[in-house]
């Protein structure tokens, strides 16, 4: 497992607001965080350096790498998923439930990012570009609601359902000792 030396992790989802969200967080806080890409569509949402890639769909990793390569962005990421796939560095099958009736409780790849961030030792995890307010993502709200009391002190979001549930990453919260 990777050893973390930083306190802050920004997990980047696929919403169009991701880059704006990142800049706002950095501007209000002055932090120099690590960045984790959540799934394929986060590839071009952050033009800075990603340290990690995480997804419940590990077969998207080659496409993620291809997109980042075309944009001449870094592709040297440490990768995580719940199932083995070529290029996935760390596999955690215990972080998902194979029962299709319970998949909404997984919280989706965004929740997997939080679980990995916690395992890596991050003290403050900030979600950006993670809405979960519409389409197929709404079903993942129940997973977040289920664990909200366990992650409230560690996780915040710039927007969407997770912001409504856990709150925004204020300067006080980000820089809290």
Image (cartoon, rainbow, N blue to C red):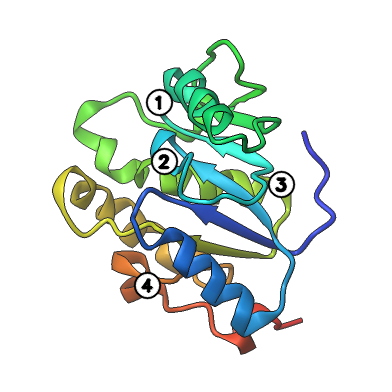
* Dot 3 alpha-carbon crowd within 10 angstroms: few under 14, some 14 to 19, many 20 or more: some
Image-based side of 132 in relation to 38, left or right:
left
Residue under circle 3? Answer: 120
Q: Is residue 71 above or below residue 155?
A: above
Q: Is residue 13 above or below residue 160?
A: above
Tag 1 near tag 2, CB within 8 Å = yes
Instruction: Please name which of the two marks, 3 or 4, marks the residue nearer to the observer.
Output: 4
Quadrant occupied by the N terminus: top right
Question: Looking at the image, which residue sits at the far top?
Answer: 86
* Dot 2 alpha-carbon crowd within 10 angstroms: few under 14, some 14 to 19, many 20 or more: many
Image-based side of 154 in relation to 19, left or right:
right
The mark nearer the N terminus, 4 or 2, is 2
Dot 2 falls on a residue whose secondary structure is: helix
Dot 1 falls on a residue whose secondary structure is: loop
Disc number for residue 109: 2
Question: Looking at the image, which residue sits at the far left?
Answer: 135
The mark nearer the N terminus, 1 or 2, is 1
The mark nearer the N terminus, 1 or 3, is 1
Residue 133 is situated, as x and y percent measured from the top left of the image, at: 21, 60
Decide which of 128, 98 is in the foreground and name it. 128
Tag 1 near tag 3, CB within 8 Å = no
The mark nearer the N terminus, 4 or 1, is 1
Instruction: Please name which of the two marks, 1 or 3, marks the residue nearer to the observer.
Output: 1
Residues at marks 1 and 2, CA–CA distance in whole angstroms? 8 Å
Seen at 62% across and 38% down, the residue is 73
* Dot 1 alpha-carbon crowd within 10 angstroms: few under 14, some 14 to 19, many 20 or more: some
The mark nearer the N terminus, 3 or 2, is 2
The reply to whether residue 156 is in sight is no
Residue 42 is situated, as x and y percent measured from the top left of the image, at: 45, 43
Residue under circle 4? Answer: 163
Residues at marks 3 and 2, CA–CA distance in whole angstroms? 16 Å
The mark nearer the N terminus, 3 or 4, is 3
């Amino acid at each position: 497992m990777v050893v973390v030396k930083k306190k802050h992790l920004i997990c980047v989802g696929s919403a169009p607001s991701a880059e704006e969200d990142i800049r706002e967080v950095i501007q209000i806080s002055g932090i120099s965080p690590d960045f984790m890409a959540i799934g394929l569509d986060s590839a071009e949402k952050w033009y800075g350096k990603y340290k990690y890639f995480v997804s419940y769909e590990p077969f998207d990793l080659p496409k993620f790498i291809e997109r980042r390569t075309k944009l001449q962005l870094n592709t040297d990421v440490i990768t995580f998923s719940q199932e083995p796939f070529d290029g996935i560095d760390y596999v955690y099958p215990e972080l998902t439930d194979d029962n299709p009736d319970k998949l909404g409780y997984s919280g989706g790849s965004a929740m997997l990012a939080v679980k990995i961030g916690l395992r890596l030792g991050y003290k403050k995890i900030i979600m950006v570009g993670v809405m979960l307010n519409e389409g197929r993502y709404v079903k993942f709200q129940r997973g977040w609601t289920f664990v909200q009391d366990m992650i409230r002190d560690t996780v915040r979001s710039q927007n969407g359902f997770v912001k409504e549930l856990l709150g925004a990453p204020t300067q006080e919260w980000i820089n809290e000792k």
